């Protein structure tokens, strides 16, 4: 058995490894675009330069520049980047069961991290590849001030700065997959994009992008939807907040290319710290790579199958761990909703939630994750098969419950130190749930259906949602009273 497989892609030959524990093949740190350095720092991605000889593809590529130390120490071992950071970050990894045989379905994984942190190196796709006989591609992309801040508009429309660079990187990765995944045993006509949190927000945004149309054929959004975006006005305002901390104005714009990346990362984090309760960095409706507004985005969503879900205790994760990128208190939530809807409509909505810890978690979870996910399901179901879920597994330490990200531990069982945050090594019931969740996830990737026992979401019918727990169940019109008061109300936190 060859332990060092070599294959040819569009840029040249690469050498990967064979994973002894799964028998699968992994190719890591493959450039899908040229390094965005120097004059290319804020440019749309350009093709990777070809190389001669055989390139080593056995090490994960650099994480994008990002701010360290904003994650509580007790979680740092789980979410910390596994490699040094560099602007030379536009690489991806491929896990495949084999290079031969019939072409396999492909899933492209987009990591989360609040649009400011994260790396593909956190996600080991080898178990998914072998369990599902699929090809798993995990992608690095620009984040934070180098990926999701609208410096171009804030500097008077500087033509050297493209909008939504992180999304453009992801589209370039999908183009690379289209052109190269067959060499890894993948089928470029059966590509599913999937992501968690900010990665799910990117998945939702890519569903609306004319530039991404035809590059994927299904989508999975885990704890994220279209309301993680913002409008052009807010994006420009956020860019001014970052520029102010850099002490840069339009007449000194050239300094943006001379500053070390660390200075831009630090200024972006300082702007985020000053904007408690909302995101500085996120995709925005630019009228270019994305439509011009959220409403236009909903109309533009690609008619491809969708699997979308959230967890029961999303909001509690942020409050317990003091990650203040969403409204944290009941007063902050009430204010955000009142500012968005007006006093009368807000009062009607808020009356559905008791003023206690359970009500706080339910309201915050519904505002940021649950209801936006159901709204996207409502819009998508008439166009393509759509499946909705909620994960209720009470797995977390520190009173986190069914926390933001618990699905990742079920999905990627080889995540480093995953068992630590999940309250020790999992018992038989949690392992069984992990198998069911992975089987449903892979079933969707393989055939656009997560299983015969999971009915599609139907806004004209039962609105069925699958609850993943120690004993799974199907619930019709989940939290129906709350869903009805939220109907037609999409709130983005500014």
Image: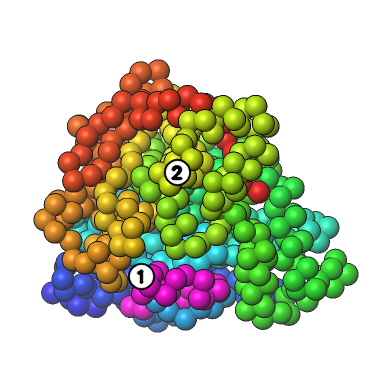
Q: Is residue 161 visible?
A: yes
> Residue 222 versus residue 364: which sits nearer the camera?
364
Which label sits on residue 356? 2
Q: Is residue 104 left or right of residue 110?
A: left
- Residue 366 horizontal/vertical position (percent): 47, 40
Q: Position of residue 88 (x, y in %)?
A: 54, 76
The relative height of residue 12 versus residue 392 in the rendered view (above or below) is: below
Residue 76: name its quadrant. Answer: bottom left
- Tell me: residue 445, above or below residue 119: above
Secondary structure state at the residue bearing disc 2? loop
Residue 74 among those drawn in magenta: yes
Q: Residue at x 62, y 59 (%)?
A: 276
Farthest-out residue, front: 356
Which residue position is annotated with label 1? 78
Q: Is any atom of residue 225 visible in this view?
A: no
Q: Which residues are magenta?
A: 57-81
Q: State which quadrant residue 414 falls in.
A: bottom left
- In the picture, the quarter occupied by the N terminus is bottom left
Main SS of residues in magenta: loop
* Residue 402: percent from left, percent from top: 32, 51
Label 1 element class? helix
State which tag comes first along the sequence, 1 or 2: 1
Marks 1 and 2 close (CB-CB < 8 Å)? no
Left or right, residue 259 beside residue 349: right
Viewer-nearest residue: 8 or 333: 333
Q: Where does the image place residue 452, in percent across and percent down from the top left?
A: 20, 32
Give the class, few, some or many, for how many residues have Cα within 10 Å of label 1's Cα (few <14, many ≥20). Answer: some
């Amino acid at each position: 058995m060859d332990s060092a497989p070599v294959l040819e892609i569009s840029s040249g030959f690469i050498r990967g490894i064979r994973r002894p524990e799964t028998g699968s093949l992994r190719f890591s740190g493959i450039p899908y675009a040229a390094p965005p350095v120097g004059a290319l720092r804020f440019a749309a991605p350009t093709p990777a330069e070809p190389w001669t000889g055989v390139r080593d593809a056995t090490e994960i590529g650099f994480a994008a520049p990002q701010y360290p130390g904003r994650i509580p120490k007790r979680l740092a071992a789980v979410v910390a980047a596994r490699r040094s950071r560099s602007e030379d970050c536009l690489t991806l990894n491929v896990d495949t069961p084999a290079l031969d045989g019939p072409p396999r379905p492909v899933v492209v994984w987009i990591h989360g991290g609040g649009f400011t942190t994260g790396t593909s190196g956190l996600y080991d796709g080898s178990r998914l590849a072998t369990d599902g006989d699929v090809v798993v591609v995990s992608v690095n992309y620009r984040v934070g001030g180098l990926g999701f801040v609208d410096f171009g508009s804030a500097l008077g429309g500087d033509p050297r700065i493209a909008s939504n660079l992180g999304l453009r990187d992801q589209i370039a990765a999908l183009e690379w997959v289209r052109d190269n995944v067959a060499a890894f045993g993948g089928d470029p006509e059966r590509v599913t994009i999937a992501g968690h949190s900010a990665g799910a927000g990117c998945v939702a945004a890519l569903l609306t992008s004319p530039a991404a149309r035809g590059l994927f054929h299904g989508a999975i959004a885990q704890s994220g939807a279209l309301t993680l975006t913002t409008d052009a006005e807010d994006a420009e305002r956020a860019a001014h907040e970052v520029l102010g901390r850099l002490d840069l104005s339009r007449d000194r714009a050239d300094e943006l290319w001379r500053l070390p990346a660390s200075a831009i990362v630090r200024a972006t984090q300082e702007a985020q710290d000053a904007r408690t309760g909302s995101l500085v960095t996120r995709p925005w409706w630019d009228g270019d790579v994305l439509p011009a507004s959220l409403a236009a985005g909903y109309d533009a969503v690609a008619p491809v199958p969708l699997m979308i879900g959230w967890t029961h205790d999303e909001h509690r994760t942020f409050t317990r761990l003091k990650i203040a990128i969403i409204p944290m208190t009941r007063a902050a939530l009430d204010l955000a909703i009142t500012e968005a809807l007006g006093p009368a409509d807000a009062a009607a909505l808020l009356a559905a939630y008791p003023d206690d810890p359970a009500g706080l978690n339910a309201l915050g979870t519904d505002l940021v994750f649950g209801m936006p996910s159901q709204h996207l399901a409502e819009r998508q179901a008439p166009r393509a098969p759509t499946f909705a879920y909620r994960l209720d597994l009470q797995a977390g330490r520190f009173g986190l419950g069914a926390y933001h990200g618990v699905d990742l531990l079920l999905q990627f069982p080889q995540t480093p130190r995953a068992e630590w945050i999940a309250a020790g090594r999992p018992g038989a019931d949690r392992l069984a749930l992990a198998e069911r969740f992975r089987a449903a996830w892979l079933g969707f990737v393989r055939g656009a259906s997560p299983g015969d026992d999971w009915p599609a979401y139907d806004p004209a019918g039962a609105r069925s949602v699958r609850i993943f727990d120690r004993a799974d169940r199907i619930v019709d019109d989940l939290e129906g009273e709350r869903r009805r008061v939220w109907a037609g109300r999409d709130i983005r936190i500014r």
